[in-house]
Image (cartoon, helix red, strand yellow):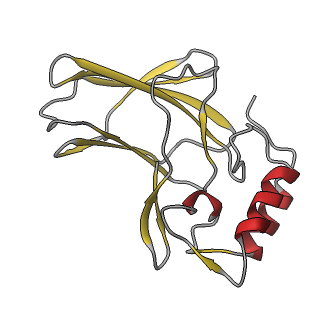
Amino acid sequence: SRKTHKNVGDLDVDILLNEAIGGAITIEPRGGPHKLLFEFNVPVTSVGTITLTDKDGVSTVRGGHRVTGNTIELPLDDVGDSLRVGIAIAGINGTYTTNAAVGFLQGDINDSKRVSAADVIALKRRSGANTPVDASNARFDINLDGTISSVDISYVKNRSGRMIP
């Protein structure tokens, strides 16, 4: 999951592949809009269909993806907070299929599927005098302003109790 952080640039949070939508999904804790990138060992020459599935099993075929070299970029501008989404990409280079499931819950830094005091504590441990963001701590910059600060901590505190069903 790629986000642009102010004055830093694009930073990623890795999403586990081949997880079931009801299982141990990775959480994207940063705010939207969302963009997922699927990277392969070979150039992508074609893509068949991309299907999104919600937690109730309702599927929709998606367009709007972009292929660049070995990467399929899938914008998810319309996916809101507190949701699980399954993504299946079929017909990559005519034959290959991949899938992933991801949860979107702003402030859930520890992938527990719930915003809690544990997330606040994790943020406090990484914040200082506006700790700069890099690839190792990108998931802690909830508001994408390029620093881990009291602003992120306050935001997560205010979201305490929210969860993904």
Q: Please state the horizontal and vertical placement of residue 46, each as a whole percent of the image.
A: 15, 30
Give the camera-side residue of 34 and 98: 98
Q: Residue at x 64, y 61 (%)?
A: 140
Give the camera-side residue of 14 and 80: 14
Q: Is residue 110 above or below residue 25?
A: below
Choose top left, top right, bottom left or bottom right for residue 64.
top left
- Horizontal placement of 34 versus 161: left or right? left
Q: Please state the horizontal and vertical placement of residue 12, each as a whole percent of the image.
A: 46, 54
Residue 88 at least partly seen: no
Q: Residue at x 32, y 34 (%)?
A: 63
Q: Residue furthest bottom?
A: 129
Q: Please state the horizontal and vertical placement of residue 149, each as a whole percent of the image.
A: 71, 75
Residue 14 at least partly seen: yes
Q: Is residue 40 above or below residue 55?
A: below
Q: Please state the horizontal and vertical placement of residue 60, each as a whole percent of the image.
A: 44, 23
Quadrant of the rendering where the C terminus is positioned: top right
- Horizontal placement of 28 versus 36: left or right? right
Choose top left, top right, bottom left or bottom right for residue 104.
top right
Q: Is residue 51 above or below residue 45?
A: above
- Horizontal placement of 65 versus 132: left or right? left
Q: Residue at x 55, y 41 (%)?
A: 79
- Horizontal placement of 47 versus 130: left or right? left
The number of numbered badges drawn on the structure is: 0
